[in-house]
Image (tube, grey):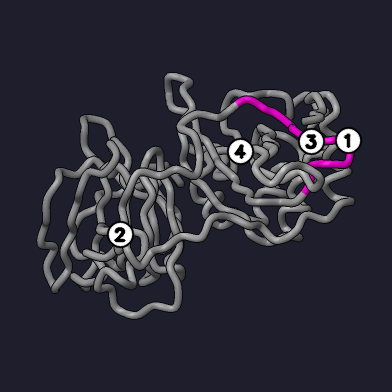
């Protein structure tokens, strides 16, 4: 295999764009034998579509029309607070333990909307919230997953889908760009992995999005032409990893896929615009960089 070093990244990316990647091809997923990966087969009420949400080591399927917000975080004295500027309306949402505001309140009483919370600090088990609302928490892959709803079938289907995630590594992987003299070849798949940083400086997976649109993938790789900026070379703090795999057009049928992976700090000029094409509004609700200073 003829591979280009990372220093040839921009040339290779131009080749990728020029070659025009084809629609992603991946192994078909037979969900008929795995209800946990298809909530519609797990007794859920009808919905138009489902999407997968990832946090640390767990993936959970939720109705595609659920929005994004913030879940409870640890407050002073060990209590749990929900800190958000989002209006307390009736839109269902997925909440990660992120401070979205310096305005905080106790997450108690009858909820205003259905929601899924990751790592909300609640005990495993079921809680009756009144007016037909229940909150059920389970632990999956080391993460607590909490679903609050008035619909037991929907709750059970969402929780049944919780599983160990395999889209992204737990920590950001090192940059690499495998290609050939003719270019990276035919696109197989692509994913954006977003990592936050805890108080100790350790990075962890907070969000993942598969990218299956040819034009979007091409635009993402084209956008990394700004990676020679000083701020774009940092690997600490909040970063997104753009990863794709391709097949050598002239290679053997059983040849291993080529891998392209670029680490993009969210402080990198132009990075936010590129990433929002495939991650907003989820990224906006999850990234402290985009949320901005609090207090």
Q: Nearer the viewer, residue 266 or 163?
A: 163
- Note whether 149 is above or below 175 in the view shown: below
Residue that mark 3 sits on: 179
Q: Earlier in the sequence, mark 1 or mark 4?
A: 1
Residue that mark 4 sits on: 240
Q: Nearer the viewer, residue 113 or 57?
A: 57
Q: Which one is in front in this view, the residue at disc 2 or the one at disc 4? A: 2
Q: Residue at x 39, y 78 (%)?
A: 47
Q: Residue at x 82, y 28 (%)?
A: 4
Q: Earlier in the sequence, mark 2 or mark 4?
A: 2
Residue that mark 1 sits on: 181
Please rate how many residues cluster around mark 2, counting C-alpha atoms within 10 Å: few if below 14, some from 14 to 19, many from 20: many
Q: Secondary structure at mark 4?
A: strand
Residue 223 in view (yes/no): no
- Note whether 42 is above or below 189 in the view shown: below
What is the x, y in percent for residue 269? 76, 38
């Amino acid at each position: 295999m003829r591979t280009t070093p990372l220093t040839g990244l921009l040339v290779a990316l131009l080749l990728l764009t020029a070659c025009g990647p084809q629609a992603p091809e991946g192994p078909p997923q037979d969900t008929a034998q795995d209800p946990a990966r298809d909530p519609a087969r797990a007794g859920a009420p009808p919905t138009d579509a489902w999407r997968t949400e990832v946090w640390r080591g767990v993936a959970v399927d939720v109705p595609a029309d659920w929005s994004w917000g913030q879940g409870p975080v640890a407050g002073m004295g060990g209590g749990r607070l929900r800190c958000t500027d989002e209006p307390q309306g009736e839109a269902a949402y997925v909440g990660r333990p992120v401070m979205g505001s310096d305005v905080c309140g106790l997450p108690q009483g009858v909820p205003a909307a259905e929601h899924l919370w990751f790592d909300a600090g609640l005990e495993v088990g079921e809680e009756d919230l009144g007016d037909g609302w229940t909150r059920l928490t389970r632990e999956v892959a080391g993460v607590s997953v909490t679903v609050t709803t008035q619909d037991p079938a929907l709750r059970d289907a969402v929780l049944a889908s919780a599983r160990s995630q395999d889209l992204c590594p737990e920590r950001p992987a090192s940059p690499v760009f495998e290609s050939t003299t003719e270019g990276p070849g035919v696109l197989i798949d692509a994913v954006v992995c977003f990592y936050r940083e805890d108080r100790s400086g350790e990075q962890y997976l907070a969000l993942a999005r598969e990218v299956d649109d040819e034009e979007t993938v091409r635009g993402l790789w084209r956008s990394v032409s700004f990676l020679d900026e000083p701020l774009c070379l940092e690997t600490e703090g909040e970063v997104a990893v753009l990863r794709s795999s391709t097949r050598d057009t002239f290679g053997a049928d059983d040849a291993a896929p080529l891998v392209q992976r670029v680490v993009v700090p969210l402080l990198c000029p132009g990075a936010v615009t590129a990433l929002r094409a495939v991650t907003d509004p989820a990224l906006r609700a999850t990234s402290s960089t985009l949320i901005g200073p609090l207090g």
